[in-house]
Amino acid sequence: MDIIRYTDDFFAMEKDLGLFAQRIDGTPWWDPVRHDVFYYIYHRLSGAKIVQAPKTSPLLRGSRLIVRRLLSWKLRLKLMFGHYDVLALRAPRLAIKGSKADVILDDILACTPGRLLVIDTYPHYYHIKLKTSGIRQQLLTDLCKLNQAVEARFGQYLDVESLVIQRFGQYREALAQYGRLLDSVEPKLIVLVQNGIEKALFHSAHDRNIPVIEAQHGLINYVHPAYSYPKEISAGSLATLPTFFLAFSQHWVDQCHYPVSQKVITGNKQLFVPTVRHKTNDILVVSADIYEKAIEDELRPAAIALWQRRFVYKLHPNQYIYRSEISDRLSDLPNVEVVANEQTFRQLIQRCSHALCIQSTGVYEALQAGLSVSLLAKLDFETHADVFDHPNLRIVNDHEEFIRVVSSPSESQASAPLPVFFQEFNAEETKNFMANLI
């Protein structure tokens, strides 16, 4: 299913129903649930396979609960005895030189003046508790007859309203919990990279007149419902959005209408890469849980046919728990190496000359580094319509077309300047910007 056409239809439904203006008990309900509804409908219409997380052992669940409680108690002690100017939420997903790093936020925090209270939301989300049950029910008449509207618009009956009821209940609980946290910290500023969808934090901060800075974490464009809105939504009009958005480059600002009050280009030290001279002829394969089957169906015959080439199968963080299973499944292919977090994406694109994927921020990293990229025409590959005309990108329908592309001599590069997706981090301008907010 063409995700661009789907997004057009989704926006039209939002406009026809006037969803952004709707309230339940005075609280806007649509934007807090919008992201999940968007993907709930799309995944069922497109047939995308949703990989369920494996069941964890009671021992592992118990150990995680203990860690979360210890972190929660530590946070309470900080709040009791400390005073802070800035509340920061980071997601340290990578290890760099032995330390956990948030490659998006750390450079920005280094430019932020004042006393910082830093909450790491990864790997343990502990500062608030997201309920999964016991959610108070709403009258379905408050939901604009969404099920009927979805069926009329998309031609399939889907119980969207039950999802909305659950997610909105979770949102209201998160709204109350974030309210208590902000009232305790009383920060002058909030800085974060989203690890999930933080609408409740944005709303709580808005109600308390606390400015919020969100740093871009990855790919944003017209079909990303956390960042793309109908153009009728004016900048600064939604309490459920941050005040400022720090972007990697102007390219991302131009890709969609994200109606925050102000967008600032800061770049990123870790994502910026100059064109590199590749050390090997390896092929980088970029995966994620919803693309796993489609990617592997084409990877296997390609790896067999191109037995003399090495394939590096890079897992998304949401696949790390399946690494052993994936490795076992591909163990009969000696030229396929499965990589989780022991090598960064930056390291991998410096050793590979070609990349294969369906949808990923890595498409832009690979193109900027000078790799040739094959985009597999499956699922929501149209997400990358903004680079379909890039001279180093080819769209392939299956492994046979992919094999022909990587086996052909490289074509000459375009003489015109190529788009810049990731600017170098500008520490001086970032310091000046942050100083004016404290």
Image (spheres, rainbow, N blue to C red):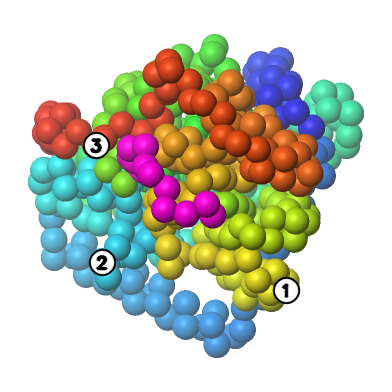
Residue shown at 61% from the left, 84% from the top: 57
Identify which amino acid the numbered label 3 is placed on. Answer: Phe
Query: What are the residue bounds of the magenta stretch?
Result: 271-282
Q: Earlier in the sequence, mark 1 or mark 3?
A: 1
- Between disc 1 and disc 3, the foreground one is 1
Give the class, few, some or many, for how many residues have Cα within 10 Å of label 3's Cα (few <14, many ≥20).
many
Q: Is residue 382 above or below residue 8?
A: below
> Is 186 placed above or below 261 here?
below
Could you say where residue 52 lies in the image, as x and y percent from the top left? 70, 63
SS at mark 1 in the image: loop
CB under 8 Å between callouts 3 and 2? no
Whether residue 279 is in magenta: the answer is yes
Q: Quadrant of residue 156?
A: top right
Q: Which residue is denoted by mark 2 in the rendering?
A: 97
Q: Nearer the viewer, residue 140 or 198?
A: 198
The residue tagged with tag 2: helix, strand or loop? loop
Residue at image location 56% in from the left, 34% down from the top: 410
Label placed on residue 332:
1
Q: Amino acid at mark 1?
A: Asp
